[in-house]
């Protein structure tokens, strides 16, 4: 009976290892999709002030998308997106400002974003574009704040961005992450403990 229980425990543990391994592979493969998603969320807007959120797409990214889509289009500021259909940049032409934004010699096209039902402002970026050199502009009658996300990280194909409205602070959500190696060490330790218990019980029975 004990041998049967021991065998079932080993089968359970091995199955658990396979599930974790497959989940890790799925997570890794998810980053291979054509796009990753920027998700921008406003926090601590205690007075519920009206605010416009603009995504600032750099000239370099727009030219990258044009090349990615094999189009023969010359970059011409905001008109590049207003007058042309670039499949990799899904945007409503009515949401594009005529005036571009410039910072450190880099030109950005300003796109007004609409929030979804979860109050998230989302936008898809080509996965093989490796720089997060786009900006966000948070603007209303009393505020004009430029948010830089260059040092932010992706998680499962999503770059989550939180903006503290009152403090003008941009950060990523706090999260506890256990690496695959940590989980494996825990499982190995669990196996060793189980084997030790069974060995002790067997030895006690023989005595």
Image (cartoon, rainbow, N blue to C red):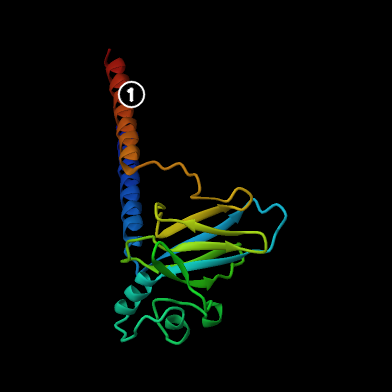
Tell me if residue 15 comes above or below residue 186 in the rendering: below
Q: Residue furthest front?
A: 105
Q: Position of residue 118 (x, y in %)?
A: 60, 62
Q: Residue at x 32, y 85 (%)?
A: 71
The extreme top residue here reads 207
Q: Quadrant of the C terminus?
A: top left
| Side (left or right) of 147 relative to 205 | right
175 above or below 57? above
The answer to whether residue 8 of the structure is visible from this angle is: no
- Relative horizontal placement of residue 142, taking residue 34 as reference (left or right): right
Q: Quick check: can you spot residue 27?
A: yes
Which residue is painted at 33% across and 29% down in the image? 194
**Which residue is outermost to the right?**
47
Q: Residue 28: image x %, image y %? A: 32, 56
The kind of secondary structure element at disc 1 is helix
Quadrant where the N terminus sits is top left
Q: Identify the residue position indicated by label 1 in the image.
A: 197
Q: Residue drawn at (35%, 53%), measured in percent from left and top?
A: 23
Q: Position of residue 163 (x, y in %)?
A: 56, 53
**In-image side of 164 versus 14 (left or right):** right
**In the visual, does 148 lie left or right of 43?**
left
Whether 8 is drawn above or below 157: the answer is: above
Count residues near mark 1 (Cα–Cα under 10 Å), then give few for <14, some for 14-19, many for 20+: few
How many marks can you see?
1
Q: Nearer the viewer, residue 74 or 201?
A: 74
Task: Identify the image quadrant of residue 76.
Answer: bottom left
Q: Is residue 28 above or below residue 96?
A: above
- Most foreground residue, 21 or 98: 98
């Amino acid at each position: 009976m004990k041998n049967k229980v021991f065998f079932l425990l080993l089968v359970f543990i091995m199955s658990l290892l396979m599930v974790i391994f497959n989940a890790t592979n799925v997570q890794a493969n998810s980053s291979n999709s054509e796009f990753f998603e920027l998700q921008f969320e406003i926090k601590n807007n205690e007075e519920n002030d009206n605010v416009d959120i603009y995504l600032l797409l750099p000239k370099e990214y727009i030219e990258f998308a044009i090349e990615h889509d094999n189009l023969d289009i010359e970059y011409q500021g905001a008109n590049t997106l207003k007058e042309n259909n670039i499949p990799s940049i899904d945007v409503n032409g009515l949401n594009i400002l005529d005036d571009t934004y410039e910072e450190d010699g880099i030109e950005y096209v300003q796109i007004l974003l609409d929030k979804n039902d979860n109050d998230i402002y989302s936008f898809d970026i080509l996965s093989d574009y490796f720089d997060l050199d786009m900006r966000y502009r948070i603007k209303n009658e009393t505020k004009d704040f430029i948010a830089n996300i260059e040092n932010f990280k992706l998680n499962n194909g999503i770059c989550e961005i939180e903006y503290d409205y009152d403090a003008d602070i941009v950060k990523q959500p706090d999260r506890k992450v256990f690496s695959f190696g940590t989980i494996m060490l825990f499982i190995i330790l669990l196996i060793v403990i189980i084997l030790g218990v069974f060995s002790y019980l067997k030895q006690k029975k023989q005595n």
